[in-house]
Each structure stands twice: as C-alpha cells, then as structure tokens.
Image (spheres, rainbow, N blue to C red):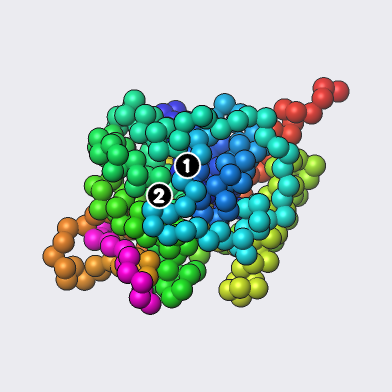
C-alpha cells in the first residue's frame, strides 16, 4: 500500500483530537508531524493535548511542534464553551511523556515540506496562522505541497460564529486570506459538509459495545464527545456533535466522500457585520479563476461508518497489545 505522508496543522480541540486518532487508525496515512496553533484552547494546552492523544494512539514517534499563540492581527479568543478549558471536554489524559520539538512550527513546516517536494499532504484543521507565515517566509513550499486539505469556512451554512463566520477562519481571517490566495492546491472542507457528519450517542454506544469498554481510547472518545454533544445541544439545538476535522482527515485517503466544485473564494477581513465570512463566486461573476476546490456535498453515512469502524479497530488493537499475556 502506498501510504500518504501527512503533516497536520491543528488546534486540539475535541474534533482535532478525533482527527489525530483517525490518522493513527488509518493504514493509508503516514502521519509524519503535527503542528499546533492557538485556536480552540491556548496553544500550550493544545500542544500538550496533541502529544497526549498521540501517546494514547500509540504514536509516540510522531513529532509535535508548537506554533503561533494568536492570529496575525487578532488576539485569540479560545473556544472554551465548545471544547472546555483544556480543549478536550471532560476527557483527562496523563501528562505526555514526549516533549515538543525545540523549533517553531513554522520552521518545522518549511523544513519538512522542502525536504520532500511533491510528497506531503498538508491537512489544516485550525486557524491558518502558521501556514500563512510559512508561505510568506518561504514561498517555495507552495509548489512543494502535494495537496492541502483545509477545514474551514461556511457558504450556504449559517456558520458557527457571528454573523455567518466559521471559527477557524474567524480566528485569523487575515491568515486565511493569505493562504487562500497563495496558490496552494486547496480542498476546502466547510461547515456545509461537516455539520452533516454528526457523532451521536448511539455511535458512542456502538463503539463501546464492539470494542473493550476498558480501552483508554474508548474512555477518551466517550468523555470528550459527551462535552461536545452537550455543547451542540445547548448552543445549537443539534443532536450529536459535528466531527469537522475528522472528515478533513478522511479525505486524505477517501476523497470521494465529498463532491467538490472549483470556485474562487475570498475572505472578508473588514470589521463590519460580514467579518471573517468566506465568500464564493458560485455564478462566476467576478471573472476570477478558481483558487480551490470546495466540498459542497458529502456521503455522511459512509463517513460515519468509516470513522466508527476505525475507532473500534484502534481501541481494540491498542488494548489487546497492552494487555498482559495470560
């Protein structure tokens, strides 16, 4: 099997943590590094979360580099209501044994991408600050990226930030605008599709019934998603939680889960009511060429089956491997 080499730039975050677990559970993916950026929680918490989730998944070998703590211009407002103070909801993981790399995430991104031109898929599931700085500092990384899958934006969806914004773009719209216009081979995964991929209590019950309930992975998913499900119900009256970032990760090896359209997309960086809105030229009125492909439809049932099955396999495999011999 030809495995896809993946760099993940993220802000863990419950759904980012699930994306890390999915990457570690997927034989099609070779996760070669994780970088963190301020978003769902303070970047120091996110870095600890990334290291702890990788350890939970048996992936201590994956390097983690800490990145920017805030946006290019905007100060960070962490999503503590959505993800909890730590970023992982009700889940509590041991302090990780591994330490982050000494170098900054932006330097790590540049060095890793330039060392393997055309080989690495860049997946971004947080604010785009690190990637924007990397592009500006070293434009040669743009042609070096094989694919760039970004979870962000909202078009025909009402958004999850005022007024029709999406949190990742809203945190740093200036960075998003730089990345969107950089020439990177972007597939954008907006709320239009991710909010159709809902992890419900029944999914958790299925995982717990099929995998050993004593598995640390099962306990982690249960505790993290319980917080996330409560938030979605209270704040948005949604039954279940949108596992946005896991869908973006799945597109590395199953791009046919979504239907995409080539579109010209821009970001509103002004301070008006449309601040941080992602705008697409659906009717080709601007005359500008498309700068990305945007996922507009998704086979949500197939994705959820895939995600649940991979979590069961990961939980069972790790638990059996760690069990003492009889």
Within 10 Å of disc 2 (Cα), the crowding (few <14, some 14-19, many 20+) is many
Q: Is residue 283 left or right of residue 295?
A: left
Query: Residue drawn 21% across and 71% down?
Result: 283
Residue 267 inside the magenta-drawn segment: yes
What whole-number distance in Å separates the C-alpha atoms at marks 2 and 1?
A: 9 Å
Residue 271 inside the magenta-drawn segment: yes
Q: Which mark is residue 129?
A: 2
- Disc 2 + disc 1, Cβ < 8 Å: yes
Quadrant, the C terminus: top right
For residue 249, above or below residue 324:
below
Residue span colored magenta: 262-274
Residue 97 location in percent, x, y?
67, 30
Q: Residue furthest left?
A: 287
Query: Residue drawn 62% across and 53% down?
Result: 87
For residue 311, above or below residue 151:
above
Residue 286 location in percent, x, y?
16, 68
Within 10 Å of disc 1 (Cα), the crowding (few <14, some 14-19, many 20+) is many
Residue 259 location in percent, x, y?
36, 57
Q: Nearer the viewer, residue 121 or 27?
A: 121
Query: Residue drawn 39% across and 33% down?
Result: 107
Residue 279 location in percent, x, y?
30, 68
Tell me if I can see residue 207 in this picture: no
Q: Is residue 123 left or right of residue 324?
A: left
Quadrant, the N terminus: top left
Q: Which mark is residue 67?
A: 1
Query: Residue drawn 57% across and 26% down?
Result: 61
Tell me if I can see residue 153 in this picture: yes
Q: Quadrant of residue 293?
A: bottom left
Mark 2 and mark 1 lie on one chain; the one further toward the N terminus is 1
Q: Is residue 93 left or right of residue 133?
A: right
């Amino acid at each position: 099997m030809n495995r896809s080499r993946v760099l993940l730039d993220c802000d863990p975050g419950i759904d980012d943590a699930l994306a890390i677990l999915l990457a570690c559970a997927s034989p099609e993916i070779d996760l070669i590094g994780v970088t963190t950026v301020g978003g769902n929680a303070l970047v120091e918490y996110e870095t600890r979360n990334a290291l702890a989730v990788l350890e939970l998944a048996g992936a201590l070998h994956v390097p983690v580099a800490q990145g920017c703590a805030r946006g290019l211009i905007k100060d960070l407002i962490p999503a503590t209501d959505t993800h909890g103070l730590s970023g992982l909801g009700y889940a509590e993981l041991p302090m990780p044994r591994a330490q982050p790399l000494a170098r900054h995430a932006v330097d790590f991104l540049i060095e890793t991408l330039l060392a393997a031109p055309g080989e690495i898929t860049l997946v971004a599931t947080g604010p785009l600050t690190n990637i924007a700085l990397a592009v500006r500092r070293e434009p040669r990384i743009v042609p070096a990226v094989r694919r760039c899958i970004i979870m962000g934006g909202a078009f025909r969806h009402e958004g999850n930030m005022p007024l029709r914004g999406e949190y990742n773009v809203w945190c740093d719209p200036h960075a998003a605008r730089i990345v969107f216009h950089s020439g990177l081979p972007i597939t954008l995964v907006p709320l239009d599709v991710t909010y159709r991929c809902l992890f419900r209590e029944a999914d958790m019950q299925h995982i717990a019934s099929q995998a050993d309930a004593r598995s640390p992975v099962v306990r982690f998913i249960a505790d993290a998603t319980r917080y996330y499900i409560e938030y979605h119900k209270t704040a948005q009256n949604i039954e279940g939680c949108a596992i946005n970032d896991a869908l973006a990760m799945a597109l590395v090896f199953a791009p046919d889960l979504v239907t995409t359209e080539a579109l010209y997309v821009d970001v509103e960086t002004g301070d008006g009511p449309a601040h941080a809105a992602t705008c697409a030229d659906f009717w080709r009125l601007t005359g500008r060429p498309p700068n990305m492909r945007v996922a507009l439809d998704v086979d949500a049932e197939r994705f959820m089956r895939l995600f649940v099955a991979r979590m069961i396999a990961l939980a069972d495999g790790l638990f059996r491997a760690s069990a003492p011999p009889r």
